[in-house]
Amino acid sequence: MRETDTARVLTAEGYILRRTGRVIEGLARYDATLVLDPDYHLARAYLGLWHLEQGNRDGAEQQLMEIEKRGGRDGDAWRLLSDSIAKGAASY
């Protein structure tokens, strides 16, 4: 990725860090993304998936509601998180 410190890059870094065991750093990237762009739905979906992986369904549902509130209902990020919540497990 050529750009740096964009919502897209920060979210991708967060995902990679989180999935490779550097969870605290990954979550920090999601937080940075949402400070930069609170409407970046993919960061919210990945954050919701993390909550679901931790057994925190309420946290996952909160992120899903935020995506909906911010106009993302029925988008890819919303579907990813909604389907995972319905299954009770994160699916990538």
Image (cartoon, rainbow, N blue to C red):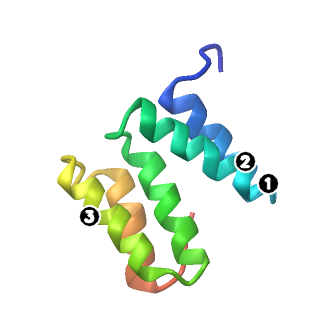
Identified by mark 2, the residue type is Glu
Vertical order, 77 against 54 (above or below) = above
Q: Is residue 22 left or right of residue 76?
A: right
Which residue in the protein does label 2 denote? 25
Residue 3 in the image: state x and y as whole percent. Answer: 59, 15
For the N terminus, which image quadrant? top right
- The residue shown at (44%, 36%) is 35
Please tell me whether mark 1 sits on a helix, a strand or a loop: loop
Report the Cα–Cα distance between label 1 and label 3: 26 Å
> Which amino acid lies under the numbered mark 1 shown in the image of this protein?
Arg
Asked if disc 1 and disc 3 are in contact, CB closer than 8 Å, the reply is no
From mark 2 to mark 3, how far is it between C-alphas? 24 Å
Badge 2 crowding class, 10 Å Cα cut-off, few under 14, some 14 to 19, many 20 or more, is: some
The label number, if any, that marks residue 35 in the structure image: none
Place of residue 30 in the rendered image (x, y in percent of width and height, measured from the top left): 55, 45
Q: Earlier in the sequence, mark 1 or mark 3?
A: 1
Q: In this view, does 37 lie above or below 31?
A: above
Query: Which residue is pictured at 56% across the width and 40% down the height?
Result: 11
In the image, is 26 to the left or to the right of 79? right
Q: Mark 1 points at which residue?
A: 22
- Which disc, if any, is residue 65? 3
Question: Circle 2 sits in a helix, a strand or a loop, which is it?
Answer: helix
* Amino acid type, callout 3: Met
The total of numbered circles placed on residues is 3
- Look at the numbered discs 1 and 2 and tell me whether their residues touch, using CB distance below 8 Å: yes
Direction from residue 41 to residue 33 in the image, left or right: right
Residue 78 seen anywhere in this rendered image of the structure: yes
Give the Cα separation between the discs numbered 1 and 2.
6 Å
> Where's residue 2, x and y in %?
64, 14
